[in-house]
Amino acid sequence: SRALDESDTENQQLLIQLHQTQEELERSLLRCQASQAQLGAQQARLQKILKHHPDYWDFDILEINLLESNGNQQVAQWRLTELYIGGRLIPEIRFKTCLANGLAGIVIQRTEGTDSPAPLLRWPNGFATAEELPCIPTRGPSTQGNNAALSGLSTSDWDTLQRLARQLAGLLTQPTDSRLPKQLNAAALRNGLLAFTKTLANWPKMLRYDSIRLQETLRNQGYERLGITLGNLRLGHHHWPALDYRLATVDIKPLPFGQNPRLEFPDGSARGVLQNWFAESNDSHGPRLELRFAQPNAMDTNVWGALSQNDQQLIGALIKTLPLQLEDLKQANPTASRPWQDWQALAGMLRDTLRDILIRSTAPRRTPAGIEE
């Protein structure tokens, strides 16, 4: 019938359109694959170029304003957009350079309010409510005052700060640059920034990490633990992509929480981080290296003695920064099965015990700039 013929014709047209659409999709897919291959090749070429030029940096807009200049002091406000430095792209960064008595410092300013660490990856917790981060070295302990800002920077932010200071010093070698304010003493600021980079290069070894995450909490018949993951760790010249470890305690009632604390390093990432990792314990919680403590001030020195010097330095740095790590975890996980101050007390006990056992007779070491470890 005529209706059936018309239906067949429509079906044939739809089928033709369907085939055409399918062919067009296949062509689009091939074009997309070709573009991705081309992009991959370009990225590989770019990485090769950057490998030969590790100090390459780039930006879109540079603005500099002189805020203060008298005698030995000089303060300038900087703003850069689309900053590419050290493999990172920072949409906007604002900071002040402060020059005093021949030494410069950099005061980093937030770009998205106190709810965001931008332009940093991690804003140091000791300055959580501050709009500015004073990266200005001062004499004294490395974890107090302005020094705490520098010691609290993440792995990547510490690297970026050092690169930025070097690049700014390089920029100031061309004092005729039209973007530099005429009243700016470019030579003095350049020398101050070079002194700043030297101070940073000699900074005491700090355990730095880009990210921290609470992997788990466990409470089971007198055994409690926090599972902690640190990402992109660095201690001195040693660097690791990640470390999983646990802060734990075993307590027998009626004794209070925290009688037998320990650090646990389960089989996994820790095996690649600790040179002398071994399965000191192996039970229902899996194989792990365990460094045990006991109230009021005891530590398993046999396990400690089985570790390499690098392992001891890393675990010592973990314990030293544990209060700061717990503060980071508290910010992200305000409600926990146990009050955070209980874990903080545990961290304090570990730190004090290790210090009393190992460092009782040694005086604080100082860097050439007078920064104490």
Image (tube, rainbow, N blue to C red):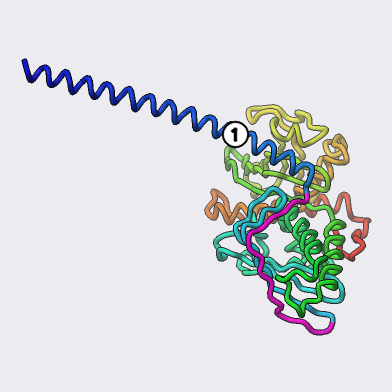
Image: 71 above or below 62: below
Image x and y of residue 305, in percent: 87, 38
Magenta stretch: includes residue 325: no
**Residue type highlighted by circle 1:** Gln
Left or right of residue 194: residue 22: left
Q: How many marks?
A: 1
Residue 58 falls within the magenta-colored stretch: yes
Q: Nearer the viewer, residue 269 or 6?
A: 6
Q: Answer yes or no: is residue 145 visible.
A: no
Q: Nearer the viewer, residue 42 or 129?
A: 42
The image shows residue 27 at horizontal and vertical percentages of 44, 27
Please tell me whether the stretch drawn in magenta is mainly helix, strand or loop. Answer: strand
Of the 4 image quadrants, the one containing the N terminus is top left
Q: Position of residue 234 (x, y in %)?
A: 76, 46
Q: What residue sits right under mark 1 in the picture?
A: 38
Asked which quadrant contains residue 83, the reply is bottom right
In front of the other: 207 or 218:
207
- Element at badge 1? helix
Q: Based on the displayed image, in which of its 4 quarters is residue 69 positioned? A: bottom right
Q: Which residues are magenta?
A: 55-71
Dot 1 surroundings within 10 Å: few (below 14), some, or many (20 or more)?
Answer: few
**Residue 110 seen anywhere in this rendered image of the structure:** yes
Rendered view: 308 above or below 196:
above
Residue 67 pos. (x, y %) = 70, 79
The answer to whether residue 133 is left or right of residue 312 is: left
